[in-house]
Amino acid sequence: MIETDVLVIGAGPAGSSAARFAAKGGVDVIVLEKKSEIGFPKRCAEGVSKKIFDKLDLEMDPHWVTNEISGVRFVAPDGTDIWLSEDQIDLPDAGYVLERKVFDKHMAAVAAREGAEIRIKTQAKGLERQEDGTFIVTCESMGKTYDIHAKIVIGADGPESHVAKWAGLNEIIKPQHMVAGVQYEMCNAKMKRNDYLEFYFGSVAPGGYFWLFPKGGDVVNAGLGIITNMAEKSAYEYLVDA
Ligand SMILES: Cc1cc2nc3c(=O)[nH]c(=O)nc-3n(C[C@H](O)[C@H](O)[C@H](O)COP(=O)(O)OP(=O)(O)OC[C@H]3O[C@@H](n4cnc5c(N)ncnc54)[C@H](O)[C@@H]3O)c2cc1C
């Protein structure tokens, strides 16, 4: 059986960060990622604050930043809009628009350089806690099933975490705390300003908002999130109509 000190399940930003710092601390780390390509497909509008890079101890790299953001535009249900620039407010959620499929791979590579072993196309299928407090995780990769024995398991498998469920944690997300979201990455976009994130509120996205995050050139992430019990149709239909 494969032995490791730390087993991280999921190679998103959370898993790769955890793996990086655990490996840096000198322990053996394995990361499992069920997808064949880290960071793709994305479920993200890719807008981030510049501040996160200090927290993550990462230098900004133009390979994974597609656009720099200097402000936000909010559009009210009646069409009234307000433009806020970085000079006017401290923007917590603006800064850059990323290319997640590059950024997530970069973060995994940073973890690997610290010594973490990354196993893609490998899905954790179950977890069993041993009497001594260690864990056996069953994995499946390309038709083969095998076990990994780990002293610590980090569940970084995203919002629908199975690891939390297997570990007996309170993983139930109530429907009223869930939003339905859908997004297209589109070209031919004509934004009023290409360095502003735009948010539209009202019937365009009941209970949530419609967003346009410019990725540079004529490319945008155009998406929306709705609260389903306030909506009259699916998130996809709202997006098509937006
Ligand atoms: C529509 C939408 C728009 C968003 N926009 C933004 C935004 O603009 N800015 C922002 O900061 N955040 C945004 N977010 C949130 C952001 O995408 C998440 O917070 C972020 O991806 C969470 O990172 P994570 O590492 O926790 O999980 P994830 O990125 O979800 O990574 C989890 C990984 O675990 C893997 N995995 C799952 N189960 C297993 C398993 N059993 N075995 C092995 N691997 C497994 C998955 O394949 C995945 O790669 C958005 C989210 C959505 C849904």
Image (tube, grey):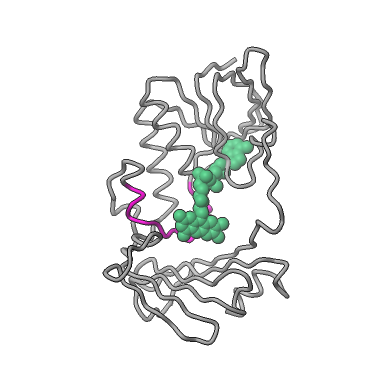
Is 41 rendered above or below residue 77? above
Place of residue 6 in the rendered image (x, y in percent of width and height, measured from the top left): 50, 24
The residue positioned 33% from the left and 48% from the top of the image is 53
For this orientation, the residue located farthest to the front is: 89
Q: Please say whether residue 46 is one of the residues in the magenta stretch.
A: yes
Q: Is residue 144 left or right of residue 150?
A: right
Q: Please say whether residue 210 is one of the residues in the magenta stretch.
A: no
Is residue 164 among the parts visible in the rendering? Answer: yes
Place of residue 150 in the rendered image (x, y in percent of width and height, measured from the top left): 56, 20
Place of residue 51 in the rendered image (x, y in percent of width and height, measured from the top left): 33, 52
The residue positioned 51% from the left and 76% from the top of the image is 200
Position of the C terminus, as image quadrant, is bottom right
**Magenta stretch: dominant SS?**
loop
The residue positioned 47% from the left and 67% from the top of the image is 221
Q: Give 83 or 146, whichever is nearer the viewer.
A: 83
Position of the N terminus, as image quadrant, is top right
Place of residue 55 in the rendered image (x, y in percent of width and height, measured from the top left): 35, 44
Is residue 40 among the parts visible in the rendering? Answer: no
Is 222 rendered above or below residue 192? above
Which quadrant of the structure image shows residue 62?
bottom left
For this orientation, the residue located farthest to the top is: 132
Residue segment shown in magenta: 39-53
Q: Give 116 or 227, whichever is nearer the viewer.
A: 227
The residue positioned 44% from the left and 31% from the top of the image is 19
Q: Is residue 222 left or right of residue 195?
A: right
Which quadrant of the structure image shows residue 207?
bottom right
Is 136 rendered above or below residue 56? above
Total numbered circles: 0
